[in-house]
Each structure stands twice: as structure tokens, then as C-alpha cells.
Amino acid sequence: GAVVSQHPSWVICKSGTSVKIECRSLDFQATTMFWYRQFPKQSLMLMATSNEGSKATYEQGVEKDKFLINHASLTLSTLTVTSAHPEDSSFYICSAAERETILTDTQYFGPGTRLTVL
Amino acid sequence: AQTVTQSQPEMSVQEAETVTLSCTYDTSESDYYLFWYKQPPSRQMILVIRQEAYKQQNATENRFSVNFQKAAKSFSLKISDSQLGDAAMYFCAYRYNQGGKLIFGQGTELSVKP
């Protein structure tokens, strides 16, 4: 099956710094990528949908200036947490889908990135 | 707005026994997809089974099967012959037919007793 990678898998940063998380589709072209946030023992909450070459669509309540998403190529989307604070500490998961199959096929999930802000 | 509800925060099953996880959803759409995902301690999301709303036949994948009741908006997962490796968080999810967004339920943590 299709593989999605995320890098880094775990990052610790100081409050006020910015952190970039990469999501890559390794063996398919992902025209659409989704970014989720998951707190311990809770469900996945969709943050935004990114389509290659266009601006991301953010869910209600998600600060677009704080969580910058760039989907510059068909295999790479990045999430940058700007001026991170302890409350941004969470598990961030991306998923990817091909244009031709987005409505009919499975989304492929990355392994997630654990962000800890000190 | 579409919602997905899993009313069982935790479930437990004896190894080799059968367990059923519940899921209900709310939507005004007639065409959509439903999924069950498994999230083990590694936190990698794994697709267990999926169901197209237009199909009346319940989906089956080896030991996993669903009971899809469209009118009742119910989508339960049955795990037969439970194995220790089935222990995980299970999420029910609904997907719009437009845009591909997934909406997840709250999750059910399944433990398997040897």
C-alpha cells in the first residue's frame, strides 16, 4: 500500500520558536493532504486541508497565522507551528490522498509527530 | 453538521472471544463512506474496514465485519476470535463525498485479556 512519512517523529522546542513538520507521500502523488491534531486519549481533530498549489482550507477555530501549511509539491506538505507555546504541545498527524481516488479510496496516514513545547 | 458518536470509551474482551464496538453518525447526505480505524500504541492509524453507504451488503475483512444500518445511522464493528494484537484505540469515521474530509468519533479503547 501507499506510504506516507512524517519528519520529525518527535520534536522538543522552546516557547516562542517555530517548528516545521514535513509530510511526504513516498510512492504516489498526493494532490490533497490533511493535517490533524490529537491530544492524549482523544480523537483526531482536522485542522486543515491542503491542496497542491493552492492555499490551505482551515477548519473553524484553527488559527491560520499560527499553523502555516504549505503544499508546494505533489509529494510534500509542511505544517509550521509559529511562535509555539506549551498549549501547542500535541500529536500532529497528516494523511494524503490522490486526486483520482480521493472520493473513492482510502486516505493514507503518516506515523505522526509528537511536539513538546517547553 | 455531520457528527460521529462512539458511546463506549472502553471495552474489554477475552482472547478468542467476539466483541462489538458501536458507532452512530448523523448526516443529511445519502452518499458517503464509513470507516473503522485502529490506532495501536505506536499511534499509526491503520484502516480496518470501510463501507460505502450505497452498498447494502455489510463489509467484511477476515475477522472484522460491520453491521451497517443506514436508516438507523448505525455502523458497528464486530471483531471475531479476538487476538492480543487487536488491543488498540478504535475510531469510527465518516467521510464527506465532497472534499474527502474525515470526521472521527471519540474512540473506543479495546483491551484484550489473555
Image (cartoon, coloured by chain):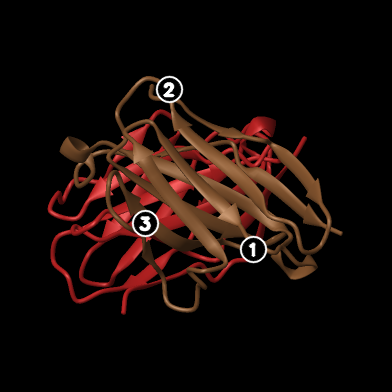
Q: Earlier in the sequence, mark 3 or mark 2?
A: 2
What is the drawing colour of chain B? red
In terms of image quadrants, where is residue A3? top left
Residue type for callout 2 = Leu
Q: Earlier along the polypeptide chain: callout 1 or callout 3? A: 1
Q: Is residue B20 above or below residue A112?
A: below
**For the image shown, how many numbered marks are present on the structure?**
3
Snapshot quadrant of residue B101: bottom left
A6 left or right of B78 in image: right
Label 1 marks a residue whose chain is A
Say what secondary structure mark 3 lies in: strand
Kind of residue at badge 1: Gln
In the displayed structure, does residue A55 sit left or right of residue B82?
left
Write down the chain letter for disc 2: A
Q: Which residue is mark 3?
A: A49
Q: Say which residue label 1 marks.
A: A42
